[in-house]
Amino acid sequence: MQSSSDRVLTIVKKSHKAAIKLAQISGTKRRLGILAIAEAIESSCDEILESNTIDLEMSREMAIAEPIA
């Protein structure tokens, strides 16, 4: 199992590679990609909100401080 810092490093490396590829893509393709991501987020809104609610409930049970509004 990877440590938290190893997971973060892996994500950072993948993000860097993706940024390089994204910089080489035409503006039209980049715009279409962003629109596709936005549509995916919007179509998953209910699931995202449900997961966030569960996370907040779990943090309260673990006595983690309330998030800053």
Image (cartoon, rainbow, N blue to C red):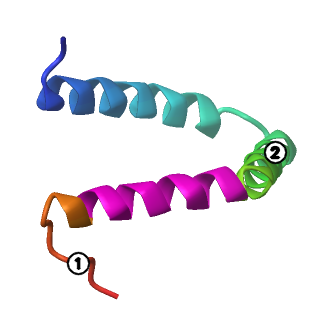
Q: Give the x, y percent position of residue 14.
A: 42, 25
Image quadrant where residue 55 sits: bottom left
At x 35%, y 30%, the residue is 11
Q: Give the x, y percent position of residue 57.
A: 35, 63
SS for dot 2: helix
Label 2 Cα crowd, 10 Å radius (few <14 / some 14-19 / many 20+): few
**In the foreground, 52 or 63:** 63
At x 30%, y 23%, the residue is 10
SS for dot 1: loop
Q: Which residue in the protein does label 1 denote?
A: 66
Say what amino acid the circle numbered 2 marks: Ala
Main SS, magenta region, reads: helix
Q: Which mark is residue 23?
A: none
- Side of 5 relative to 16 (left or right): left
> Per the image, is 44 magenta?
no
Which mark's residue is nearer the viewer, 2 or 1? 1
Label 1 Cα crowd, 10 Å radius (few <14 / some 14-19 / many 20+): few
Please report the bounds of the magenta region as a residue range: 46-59
